[in-house]
Amino acid sequence: MSKRRPSDWKVALRELKAPSPAKFIGLLEKEYMKIALSYKYLRDDELKKTFLISSLMENNTSISDFFIHVVGLDILQGANLKMEEARDKLDILVRDLKDSCLLTDGFTSEQFAMHDVVRAVAVTISYTDHHVFTGRNDVEREWKDKDKLKKCTKISLTDSTIIMELWHNYLDCPNLEYFSMATIQCSSEATKWGSSFSILEDCFTMMPKLKVLSLFRMQQSMLPSSLDLLANLQTLCLDGIRIEDVAIIGKLEKLKVLSLQNSSINELSTELGQLTQLRLLDLRNCWQLKVIVPNVISKLSQLEELYIKGHSI
C-alpha cells in the first residue's frame, strides 16, 4: 500500500480493528478483495469452515486446543471418525490453510496464527455469509437487533462486556451452534479466576441448537440450571472456571467432549457416568480434585481420550 501520510495509516489501522461488516471498502479494499478471493477458491466447504472458525481463535492457538472447538461442530467430514482420525484430518486442514497463506505458524509448527488483515476479512465473511457475531459488531446497531440475533449461528467474545449489556433481555438465538466467551486474565489474587460476571440461571433457554459451549476463566461456582436444556450440545469447555459442582453436566446425553482444565472442581460425581457418548475427558491441572467416584470412568463406554495429570489424587 503506497501511502505516505500518517492519517492514511491511522485510517488503515482503524479499518483493521473494526472492519466493515457489510463489504470491503477503504484504504485496504484491494488487499481485502485478494484475500476474499483466496477464500472463495479453497477446495471445499470443510476447508472454508475450518478457516472461518480459526479466525475466532487467538494467535498461537495449538492445533490440539483448536480441535476441541471444531470437533463438536461436525465440520470434519467422515462417518463416525474416531478422535485420532479427526485430529489427523484437522492437522491436514490447518497445514493446507498455511500452504494457502491464510494461516501461518505460531510460535511452533503445532500452533497457528493469522495476519490482522486476513482476520478482518474472515470476520467480515463470517458475519455477512454465516451470521457470526464477535466483539467487533456494533453493540447498539447489531447486537440489539433481535432479528439479526435470531439468525446468529456463532458468538465469540473475548470478554463479557457485550453480554452484560444484553443478558437481561435474554439472548434469543434459536440458530446458535457455537458460543465462546473468555474473560481477560487479571493479575491480582482476588480476581485470578477472571471476571466476577455471572451467568444467569435461564440464559440457555433460547439456544436449542447449541453444539459447542466454551466458557473460559469464568467466576461461576454453580452452572446455570438451563444448561440441561442444551440437548444437542457436543462440546463443553469450562477451562479455568471456578466451579465446584458438575453434576448437571451428566444430563447432556449427546456430549462428546468435556474439558475442565485448570478448573476448581473437587469431585467427579456419579452423574457424569451418564455421559455414554463422551469421547474425550480432560481433567488436567484440576489441583483441587480430590475424589473420582468409583465406576464413573468405567461407565464412559465410548471414551477414547482421558487426560488426568496435575491433581492431588
Image: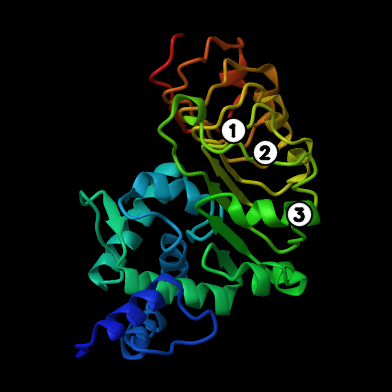
Is tag 2's residue or tag 3's residue first in the polypeptide sequence?
2
Residue at 61% x, 18% y is: 296
- As helix, strand or loop, the secondary structure at mark 1 comes to loop
Q: Which mark, by number, is residue 115?
A: none
Residue behind mark 2: 198
Check disc 3 and give the amino acid type.
Pro
Q: Position of residue 12 (x, y in %)?
A: 33, 80
Residue 200, above or below 303: below
Check disc 2 and give the amino acid type.
Ser
Check disc 1 and give the amino acid type.
Gln
Q: Nearer the viewer, residue 263 or 275?
A: 263
- As helix, strand or loop, the secondary structure at mark 3 comes to loop
Among the 4 quarters of the image, the one containing residue 199: top right
Q: How is the image coloured?
A: rainbow
Residue behind mark 1: 219
Q: Position of residue 288 (x, y in %)?
A: 50, 15
Among the 4 quarters of the image, the one containing residue 227: top right
Nearer to us: label 2 or label 3: 2
Residue at 37% x, 44% y is: 64
Residue at 80% x, 49% y is: 205
Q: Alpha carbon of mark 2 to alpha carbon of mark 1: how far?
A: 7 Å
- As helix, strand or loop, the secondary structure at mark 2 comes to loop
Pointers 2 and 1 in contact (C-beta within 8 Å): yes
Mark 2 surroundings: few (<14), some (14-19) or many (≥20) residues within 10 A: some
Residue 288, above or below 199: above
Note whether residue 210 is visible.
no
Residue behind mark 3: 208
